[in-house]
Amino acid sequence: MTLQDIKKFEFVFSNPALLKVIALQCDLFSLGEVQVTQNKAPIENDPFLKLIKKPNTFQTQTQFLWDFMFWNMMGNGYCYVDSALVDKPNNKMVFLNYFKMQWPTDLFKIADKIFIERKDLAKYNITYRYSDGTTSLLPLDRIIISSDLSNNFGNWFVSPSRIDALVKVISNSEEALDAKNVNLRYSGRFLVGSPTDAQRTGMTEEEKKSITDDMDKDKHKRVFPMSSLVNIRRFVDNISALQLDPSFLADYFLIGTMFNIPRDVLEAYNSATYENQEKARIAHIHYTLSPKGNEFMNSFENMFGYEQENKNIQLTWDHLLMMQVAKNDQIDYKTKEINAFQSCLDMGMTPEEANKYLGSAFVITSGAITNPPQKISLTFAK
């Protein structure tokens, strides 16, 4: 683990904006449901479903999926699979903390080579160092590596992270929080001094102490008579003018967009309606989370030989209530398409012409076209 990795890890757990973005992404991803199909038919008792439901002694499927997204957002996820036999008793899967991994030095001699087979990785072992100083040797071919960005930047095993490009933004958000903290602490404090007078060089120490004692000794006193005129003003005259909260939210939004999270999903602004937020989450799942999830599941297909059995492992969020919004929109779209097709027939188009014009694929299963045409039954072509 490099100093840059250590700093990156510290960033996550010390910066609220970054941690909120990561937690939001991980929480939504962990709601995914794993499915296994064979020739498109679901397999409810597949051994992989049993394995991922309880991947290791300490985690559930939800926690395991949360870990995947967390380490992926950090740049690289390293999932150790104990056995390539999916139904082996006590088989385990767990994500490794990359700062506990020690790579063999000779591995980096082939880190950018293009002619490497997975079986060639079996001779390399990762040294995994625990907190008490003990170690375990983990075969590299038992580790599934997932990268947030491309893994083809000169090292197949370690890739850069988006967080690397966010260092200044994260620093800015921390500065905004620090500035707000300092200004709030000083907002209840005051500067007290005598008016400018060319004959005087300033207040004496005795005068300063006298004013401080008088102003501070009775917290409920409202009027303080002085022997001479003094000026009093706050350390912080107008904290709202500093725009610290909008600055922090802007940094939070920028961090979120770096990970392709839509504005409405981030919920940092009150302008979004509930329906828009739900639609934004659905789009976010389809375009960002689902591709990463299915790529991760494809790695297990390769690990356990499911490809040879024509089995497919996928991650889906169709069971979530918010997906009903997408289903309703799909029904509305199909209804409009059917009505448009019927309108084309009413105008005298043939079914073939109507399908070509609308880009649809309806098949007439009953009824007859008459003049004027009567209603007909339609099915969607598969």
Image (cartoon, grey):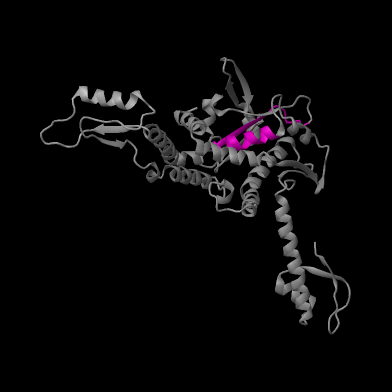
Q: Nearer the viewer, residue 309 or 176?
A: 176
Q: Nearer the viewer, residue 305 or 14?
A: 14
Is residue 57 shown left or right of residue 229? right
Residue visible at 58% across and 19% down in the picture: 130
Which stretch did the figure color magenta?
62-86
- Asked whether 73 falls inside the magenta stretch, the response is yes
Residue 170 appears at what percent x and percent y? 45, 38
Q: Is residue 373 visible?
A: yes
Residue visible at 65% across and 54% down in the picture: 275
Q: Nearer the viewer, residue 356 or 366?
A: 366
Is residue 46 shown left or right of residue 156? right
Q: Is residue 160 visible?
A: no
Looking at the image, residue 176 lies above or below residue 224 = below
Residue 210 appears at what percent x and percent y? 25, 23
Looking at the image, residue 206 lies above or below residue 223 = above
Residue 13 appears at what percent x and percent y? 52, 31
Residue 249 appears at what percent x and percent y? 48, 44
Direction bottom: furthest residue? 371
Direction left: furthest residue? 199
Residue visible at 73% across and 31% down in the picture: 84
> Which quarter of the rendered picture does the C terminus lie within?
bottom right
- Asked whether 307 falls inside the magenta stretch, the response is no
Task: Kindly indicate the quadrant of the structure image that contains residue 54.
Answer: top right
Q: Nearer the viewer, residue 297 or 373?
A: 373
Looking at the image, residue 201 lies above or below residue 364 = above
Labels in figure, total: 0
